[in-house]
Amino acid sequence: MTTQPFVWKTSNDLYRLYYYSGGGAHFYEFVVGGNKLVLDYDFSSPLPLSWHMVTCWFDSTTGGGGIALNNQAPVTGTALSTVTLEFAYFQLGANNGSANSLNGLLDMVSLHPYVLSSNERTYLYNNGSGRIGRLLES
């Protein structure tokens, strides 16, 4: 199995996003609160030299979260118990002390203080071309 972390937030893995593959399966996985919410986005096989837009979110008020790949329908769920928000550093591309590091490039990382709407995710994906800049005004 190959594991490649993208975004990791320390303090008991408050947030964790990574790609893994093994046995012919390919997943993006988003984990919140040390396995209180685990969402796997299964996709067939990645194309070499292609980019993917992975969007994940967690709403601490409702306990709900989701993960979407390339603006397709998201996989969503609700945390099994309360997730305590903690202050800690984000790590991009690898988990501290782990031999598993990202084998690729991060084109852009964007953190938002709110959950993006479906329209905002569509705008950023831009039919596979990507888009940098301000989001649509609501």
Image (cartoon, rainbow, N blue to C red):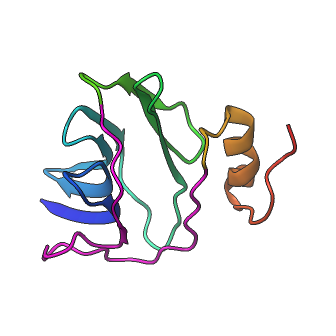
Q: Residue furthest front?
A: 87
Foreground residue, 2 or 99?
99
Location of the C terminus by quadrant is top right
Q: Is residue 105 magenta?
A: yes
Q: Residue furthest right?
A: 137
Residue 113 picture location, percent across and down: 60, 48
| Quadrant assignment, res 111 | bottom right
| Quadrant assignment, res 4 | bottom left
Residue 68 picture location, percent across and down: 50, 40
| Number of disc labels | 0
Q: Residue at point 60% right, 42% down?
A: 71
Look at the picture and state if 123 lies above or below 18: above
Residue 18 picture location, percent across and down: 31, 57
Location of the N terminus by quadrant is bottom left
Look at the picture and state if 55 lies above or below 118: below
Q: Residue at point 56% right, 74% down?
A: 107
Foreground residue, 7 or 60?
60
Q: Is residue 114 left or right of residue 24?
A: right
Foreground residue, 90 or 38?
90
Q: Residue at point 79% right, 52% down?
A: 135
Residue 112 picture location, percent across and down: 61, 51
Q: Is residue 51 left or right of residue 98?
A: right
Q: Is residue 26 magenta?
A: no
Look at the picture and state if 59 lies above or below 22: above
| SS assignment for the magenta stretch, majority | loop
Magenta range: 83-112
